[in-house]
Image: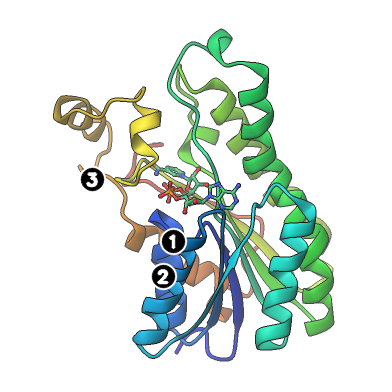
């Protein structure tokens, strides 16, 4: 098992990519704490992992709220004895629209959930990793942060920030054996896709998007989970500051 004896937190683990990551990590021996705004979703995934013989707990938490992020980290420490892996996956989309049509409240929420969460996660998780003599952080950014496209300006910028934060955190935390990496998924068939496409998701729109992905399909939670597993495992113990596209060649 590639994550035996590791304790991991997966934010946004109640759906989509996060659910795939939580399931895969648990199957590889990690004790997984699923932090999600949606209590029912987090409990469903944790319950199914436990039923399959894995170790998982569910915590209701908003990643943009410091006290809730602290409680999430403390739940991992209290339940499983420490923290080795933090996957900052929870994020929110921007509805595809002209940049000037996104109001200030929507902008603030987008940056609180997609960017401030990385800061809050570091504030609360890094001290716990120091107690273990090291750890690893995987941030879920996006191809949107590498190849920005019209209609998603503020979302593109939030994911660009995640990519730069990943590299900056990696270089500062490296001497403490805390590795920080990111994944840049291309669009996947999760509830978020509809927003990226402007609130409507027709077969024609999907086919048009797929035609821009050389491998010829959307990403899946399994694709993202496989890449996250490698980065979080000891197999990647010399890899830090990498922001890896998981995109079927889209960013070439
Ligand atoms: N789906 C895509 O096309 C795509 C592409 C590239 C990157 N991403 C990124 O991947 C990550 C996961 O996206 P997904 O498509 O699996 O989404 P999803 O909508 O399937 O799941 C997101 C989960 O995060 C939770 N969540 C949302 N806001 C939260 C908050 N403030 N605090 C805690 N939990 C919260 C939701 O309840 C949900 O369970 C996001 O960071 C997203 O930006 C998605």
Q: CA distance from mark 2 to mark 3?
A: 30 Å
Q: Mark 3: is the Cβ under 8 angstroms from ligand 1? A: no
Residue pictured at 61% horizontal, 58% vertical: 181
Q: CA distance from mark 2 to mark 1?
A: 6 Å
What residue does disc 2 label?
Answer: 45
- Front disc: 2 or 3: 2
Residue 108: x %, y % from top left = 69, 28
- Whether residue 146 is visible here, answered yes or no, is no
Tags 3 and 1 touching, CB below 8 Å: no
- Residue 163: quarter of image: top right
Q: Which mark is residue 52?
A: none
Element at label 3: loop
- Front disc: 3 or 1: 1
- In the image, residue 107 sits, relative to residue 7, either above or below, namely above
What residue does disc 1 label?
Answer: 41
Q: Which comes before the other along the chain, label 3 or label 1? A: 1
Tags 2 and 1 touching, CB below 8 Å: yes
Tags 2 and 3 touching, CB below 8 Å: no
Q: Residues within 10 Å of mark 1 (few under 14, many from 20)?
A: many
- In the image, residue 73 sits, relative to residue 159, either above or below, namely below
Residue 3: x %, y % from top left = 52, 84
Q: Mark 1: is the Cβ under 8 angstroms from ligand 1? A: yes
Give the left or right position of residue 112, taking residue 159 as reference. Answer: right
Q: Which comes before the other along the chain, label 2 or label 3? A: 2
In depth, the one of 164 and 18 nearer the eye is 18
What residue does disc 3 label?
Answer: 215
Q: Residues within 10 Å of mark 3 (few under 14, many from 20)?
A: few
Q: Residues within 10 Å of mark 2 (few under 14, many from 20)?
A: many
């Amino acid at each position: 098992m590639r994550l035996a004896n590791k304790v991991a937190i997966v934010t946004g683990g109640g759906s989509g990519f996060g659910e795939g990551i939580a399931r895969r990590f648990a199957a590889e021996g990690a004790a997984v704490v699923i932090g999600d705004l949606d209590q029912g979703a987090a409990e469903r995934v944790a319950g199914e992992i436990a039923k399959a013989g894995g170790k998982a707990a569910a915590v209701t938490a908003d990643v943009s709220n410091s006290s809730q992020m602290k409680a999430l980290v403390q739940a991992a420490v209290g339940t499983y004895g420490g923290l080795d892996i933090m996957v900052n996956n929870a994020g929110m989309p921007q509805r595809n629209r002209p940049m000037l049509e996104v109001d200030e409240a929507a902008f603030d929420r987008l940056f609180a959930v997609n960017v401030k969460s990385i800061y809050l996660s570091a504030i609360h998780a890094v001290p716990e990793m120091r107690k273990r003599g090291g750890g690893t952080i995987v941030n879920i950014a996006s191809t949107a942060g590498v190849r920005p496209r019209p209609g998603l300006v503020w979302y593109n910028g939030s994911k660009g920030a995640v990519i730069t934060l990943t590299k900056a955190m990696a270089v500062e935390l490296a001497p403490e054996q805390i590795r920080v990496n990111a994944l840049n998924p291309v669009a996947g068939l999760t509830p978020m896709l509809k927003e990226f496409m402007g609130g409507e998701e027709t077969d024609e729109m999907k086919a048009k998007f797929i035609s821009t992905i050389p491998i010829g399909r959307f990403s899946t939670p399994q694709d993202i989970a496989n890449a996250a597993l490698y980065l979080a495992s000891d197999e990647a113990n010399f890899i830090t500051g990498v922001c890896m596209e998981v995109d079927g060649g889209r960013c070439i």
